[in-house]
Each structure stands twice: as structure tokens, then as C-alpha cells.
Image: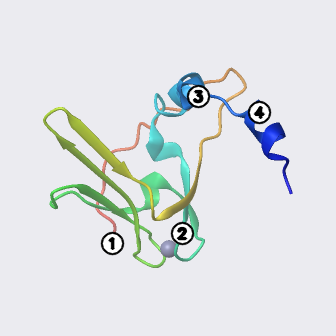
Amino acid sequence: MTDPDEAADRRLDANAAAGPLAELFTVDLTVAVATCAGCGNDAPLAAHLLYADAPALVVRCPNCAGVVLRYASSGSTLRLDLTGARLLTVTLAADGSVGISERQPHRPP
Ligand SMILES: [Zn+2]
């Protein structure tokens, strides 16, 4: 069990996460591998199923059709729901960059 005093010594204000999170949210997330919270399937986000005609963008797992991600933009508010994603993994190139997708949008069969 963690000593409460030791845990308090390690704790930071979450504003300290701004720098590391800025690395994640400046990349093309369609190249990220999403792990479905429902079935555990790993697939690039671009290989998931997108429903763009709902009030929010809804991204579903290509294996079980569970909702992996929802994103809504309304006026000055952006909302991202990743409840259905157990993990998002972005692999950086040796130079720290992320490959930008040049794929064209397509409709899955
Ligand atoms: Zn799934």
C-alpha cells in the first residue's frame, strides 16, 4: 500500500500534463491504433467505421461495432469521448514525427 505522505509528495497539479498531452493532440489521430474497450480489437483509427451523420462523429470498432470514440464540435465547445477505447497508441518516427495520412476517405464494404 502506498504511504499517503509519499503519494502527496509525488502528486503534481494536472496543469503539468499540458506539455506531454500537447504531443498527443497535435498528431493525425487516424494513424493511432485504438484498442476497443469492448472486445480488445486493435486497429488503426482510420480502419474503424465512421458515422458522421449523427450530432457527433461516431467511430465504431470494425470487429464488434461498439462505439470507440465520439467527437462533437459545437460553437466554442469541443467534446471528445474515448470511453469505448481502452488505449490509443501513436507510434512516432525516429525523428519524432508522425506519418501524416495521405489516404483518401473511403466507405467500408
Ligand atoms: Zn470491438
Q: Are marks 4 and 1 in contact (CB under 8 Å)?
A: no
- Which comes before the other along the chain, label 1 or label 3? 3
Q: Position of residue 25 (x, y in %)?
A: 47, 33
Q: How far, Cα to Cα, is label 1 from label 3?
A: 47 Å
In which quadrant is the C terminus drawn? bottom left
Label 4: element kind: helix
Cα distance, mark 2 to mark 4?
A: 29 Å
Residue that label 3 marks: 13
Which amino acid is tagged 2? Answer: Ala
Q: Which residue is mark 1?
A: 109
Left-right relation of 109 to 68: left
What mark, if any, has residue 37 been given in the picture? 2
Cα–Cα gap, marks 4 and 1: 50 Å
Q: Give the CA distance from mark 3 to mark 2.
A: 28 Å
Q: CA distance from mark 3 to mark 4?
A: 10 Å
> In terms of image quadrants, where is residue 23?
top right
The kind of residue tagged 4 is Arg
Going 85% across and 47% down the picture, which residue do you hit?
3
Q: Position of residue 98 (x, y in %)?
A: 57, 31
Q: Residue at x 52, y 75 (%)?
A: 38
Quadrant in the picture for residue 99: top right
